[in-house]
Amino acid sequence: MADPEHPRLIIRNFLSIDECKELEFIHKSCSTVGYRPNVFSTTLSHLIATNSFHLIIPFVRIRERLKDKLEEFFGCEYELFVEFTGLISWSRGASIGWHSDDNRPYLKQRDYAAVCYLNSYGRDFSGGLFHFQDGEPTSIMPMAGDVVMYTADCRNIHSVDEIIDGERLTLTLWFSRDSSHDEDAKLISLLSQNLLRDNKADSCLPLPASGNMYWFSVEQTSNEQLGFNICWARLHVLGYDTYISEADGCDSDVSELLVKPVQLVRNNEMLDLEFVNILHALQVVHFFCWKASALRTREVTRDIKVVELSDMQRQKINSLKSVVLNDHDLAASFFCSIPSKKSSCIRFDWTGIMAAVDAWGDYTSKLIEQIHLQLPHWRTHQSIYSVQLGE
Ligand SMILES: O=C(O)CCC(=O)C(=O)O
Ligand SMILES: [Fe+2]
């Protein structure tokens, strides 16, 4: 039963570690700059808009489980709609002072919040403790898999300490009693438009959004500013460079670079395989990070061709870097894991990356199949739920 003065619930290990890792893979390969300084986010509508609509499938069961648990605990069965679902990461310097989650006129529809921690305090980031102003518990140390649920009103005023190091990642949902704020209706309409429009979407190769959505600068203004593109920054912190044969010198426009085919480079070697764009390369690399140990036993059917870089190619790579990562120290400080924990790095080899290319393709096809099977049911019921097929 919820305490009427401070209605809140904390559940340890609500999500499995693999669920956390899958959502981390999605966020690190699809996020955009967020709504507040040093915050990055991945919304479901963004996944749909960038031809990665199949990636909403991993959220479906989790959303449902969260809503069921929340409704049961707070005694509001069948009353709630999901108002917002998003992956949110906070990097060094991000924090939020005392607030309730409905504290703006345009947020009044929010009745409940559920925050799932996808990584852990001390291991993946430092700082970032959660505090309630009154009542118990006073503080929460975020740990992967745990969830905190609370009413969005002033009975649950809370804050989050500044992130000191690393990247703190959550899956955050808000729920509303007001059906006009039901996120599902909007998502189903977007999905229908995208899937109907694009029959050949079967390969689900990501399509970048506009360049400014991936551009981080301290001032958070235009493309011209000193800063970095977050897609390249995420590859850079993992030790990868990229080569774009079609890039024509250091005056290239970042928005144009986002849609050009890229090759992955590591030290002095380049994989002789073109990814359709930087987001495609990023998805495969993060898929490799997620599944590295399982990929070791996967047979690679294609030839792996790695070439040594020429001086010309190296020059081109450096001039590309000066455009997309013109503040690479800042980029590193945002997306690096915390310094004392470097040992958790994944052992790199090109065979692993090639295995990831194939395995990412299989993973993607399975999710596309799922979405094609489920969408008709979602449209009928105007609700996103896990359809028990074969019923
Ligand atoms: O991430 C958290 O622990 C809470 C975040 C929060 O308070 C918010 O986004 O309103
Ligand atoms: Fe909040």
Image: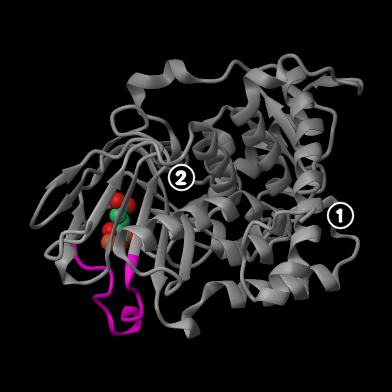
* Label 2 environment density (alpha carbons within 10 Å; few <14, some 14–19, many ≥20): some
The residue that mark 1 highlights is 202
Magenta segment's dominant SS is loop
Residue 343 in picture, x, y percent from top left: 44, 15
Pick the front one: 240 or 148: 148
Pick the front one: 54 or 389: 389
Residue 41 in picture, x, y percent from top left: 48, 57
Residue 99 magenta-drawn?
yes
Residue 117, labelled with which disc?
A: none
Check disc 2 and give the amino acid type: Asp
Pick the front one: 309 or 23: 23
Question: Label 1 CB, ligand 1: below 8 Å?
Answer: no
Q: Which part of the image, by quadrant, shows the C terminus?
A: bottom right
Q: Residue at x 81, y 60 (%)?
A: 372
Pick the front one: 30 or 361: 361
Residue 216 in picture, x, y percent from top left: 47, 55
Q: Is residue 77 left or right of residue 126?
A: right
Picture quarter with ligand 1: bottom left
Q: Residue at x 27, y 68 (%)?
A: 152
Mark 1 vs mark 2: in front: 1
Q: What segment is highlighted magenta in the picture?
A: 98-112
User: Callout 2: helix, strand or loop?
Assistant: loop
User: Callout 1: helix, strand or loop?
Assistant: helix
The residue that mark 2 highlights is 327
